[in-house]
């Protein structure tokens, strides 16, 4: 594994399994009365979020703190970028402060990769979501959450073989869908993308998935329903269908949820648009809705990523 995490496709199955297995260790740490280890004491991690975030930002920050690292939160709205400093010079400035890793989210697909190329192996660059390209830690935490649900954890040979996962909604504009497919497929899940044709990616024939535009037809075959938000902020073409049409065909309404077996798992990366992707009553009351478990596991997954990149030769405890 390089000293960056940009895209799960770069890791391959072994790299993904290694991080999922390491997450088992940090789930155990997270359950201790004092969920903190000294592993990254003296390391500094900068958080640079050019797009809004609740889960990814807070869980990376918490993960770094639980590893005893120092955290610098870059103030994107009040930084000297507003005075004309380039992003490249800003990154150089942050590097000169003695930072060991940059966790970066940006609306531009590929930008974390460009920064990684510029900094080489002097510091680690971790992609916290870039445009519609990738959200690798979300893919890892979603895969980990399903491994935990079906197998009690990841183990050394994490596997979702025999699990049929439907990913429902705005696949075309979703970096989460791209990273989920990379993670799920690498450990053996069967995946069906379910979306209107206008929200399916143009290159979907190259993805290791089946495709349908009919949720009700596929639903009885699924073990997992992974719901996605319609990413209006990234839609600049004519792919949007009306909200009412979307709810009728793809929303996890109370009526639709009643047609599913009770053991079928529902996931959502958040943020949720209540009443669109999923009805309040399904989100709040149905068993096997793993949305909060995904958030909880996000901390352990991000501890695993930070430790793997910055903790070479160091014991966890
Ligand atoms: N799932 C996710 O990336 O959520 P945030 O935008 O809140 O970080």
Image (cartoon, helix red, strand yellow):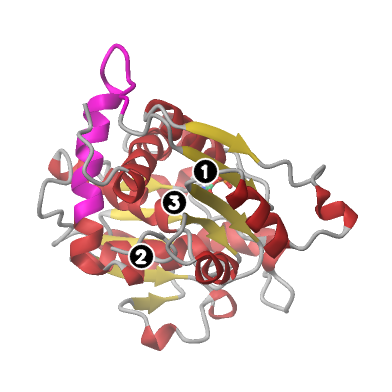
Q: Quadrant of the C terminus?
A: top left
Locate residue 193 relative to residue 23 in the image: left or right: right
Q: Are marks 3 and 2 in contact (CB under 8 Å)?
A: no
Question: Which numbered disc, 2 or 1, marks the residue that appears first in the sequence?
Answer: 2
Q: Is mark 1 within 8 Å of ligand 1?
A: yes
Q: Nearer the viewer, mark 3 or mark 2?
A: 2
Q: Quadrant of the N terminus?
A: bottom left
The residue carrying mark 2 is 8
What is the residue that sits farthest to the top in this orientation? Answer: 33
Residue 251 image point, x, y percent: 53, 54
The residue carrying mark 1 is 56
Question: Which numbered disc, 1 or 3, marks the residue that appears first in the sequence?
Answer: 1
* SS state under label 2: helix
Question: Which numbered disc, 3 or 2, marks the residue that appears first in the sequence?
Answer: 2
Main SS of the magenta part reads helix
Q: Residues within 10 Å of mark 3 (few under 14, many from 20)?
A: some
Q: Residue at x 44, y 31 (%)?
A: 69
Locate residue 47 relative to residue 207 in the image: left or right: right
């Amino acid at each position: 594994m390089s000293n960056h995490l940009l895209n799960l496709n770069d890791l391959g199955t072994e790299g993904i399994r290694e991080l999922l297995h390491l997450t088992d260790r940090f789930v155990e740490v997270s359950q201790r009365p004092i969920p903190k280890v000294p592993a990254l004491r003296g390391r500094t991690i900068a958080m640079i979020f050019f797009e809004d975030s609740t889960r990814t930002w807070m869980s990376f920050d918490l993960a770094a703190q639980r590893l005893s690292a120092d955290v610098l939160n870059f103030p994107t709205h009040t930084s000297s970028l507003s005075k004309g400093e380039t992003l490249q010079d800003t990154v150089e400035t942050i590097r000169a402060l003695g930072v060991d890793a940059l966790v970066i989210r940006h609306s531009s697909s590929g930008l974390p990769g460009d920064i990684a190329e510029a900094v080489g192996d002097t510091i680690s660059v971790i992609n916290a979501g870039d445009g519609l390209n990738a959200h690798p830690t979300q893919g890892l935490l979603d895969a980990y959450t399903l491994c935990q649900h079906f197998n009690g954890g990841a183990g050394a040979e994490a596997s979702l073989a025999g699990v049929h996962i439907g990913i429902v909604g705005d696949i075309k504009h979703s970096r989460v869908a791209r990273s989920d497919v990379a993670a799920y497929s690498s450990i053996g899940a069967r995946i069906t993308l379910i979306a209107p044709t206008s929200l399916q990616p143009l290159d979907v024939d190259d993805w290791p998935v089946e495709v349908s535009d009919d949720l009700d037809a596929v639903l009885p075959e699924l073990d997992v329903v992974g719901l996605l938000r319609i990413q209006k902020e990234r839609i600049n073409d004519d792919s949007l269908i009306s909200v009412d049409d979307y709810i009728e065909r793809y929303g996890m309404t109370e009526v639709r949820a009643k047609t599913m077996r009770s053991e079928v798992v529902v996931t959502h990366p958040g943020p949720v648009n209540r009443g669109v992707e999923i009805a309040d009553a399904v989100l709040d009351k149905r068993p096997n809705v793993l949305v909060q478990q995904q958030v909880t596991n996000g901390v352990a997954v991000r501890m695993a990523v930070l430790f793997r990149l910055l903790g070479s030769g160091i014991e966890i405890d």
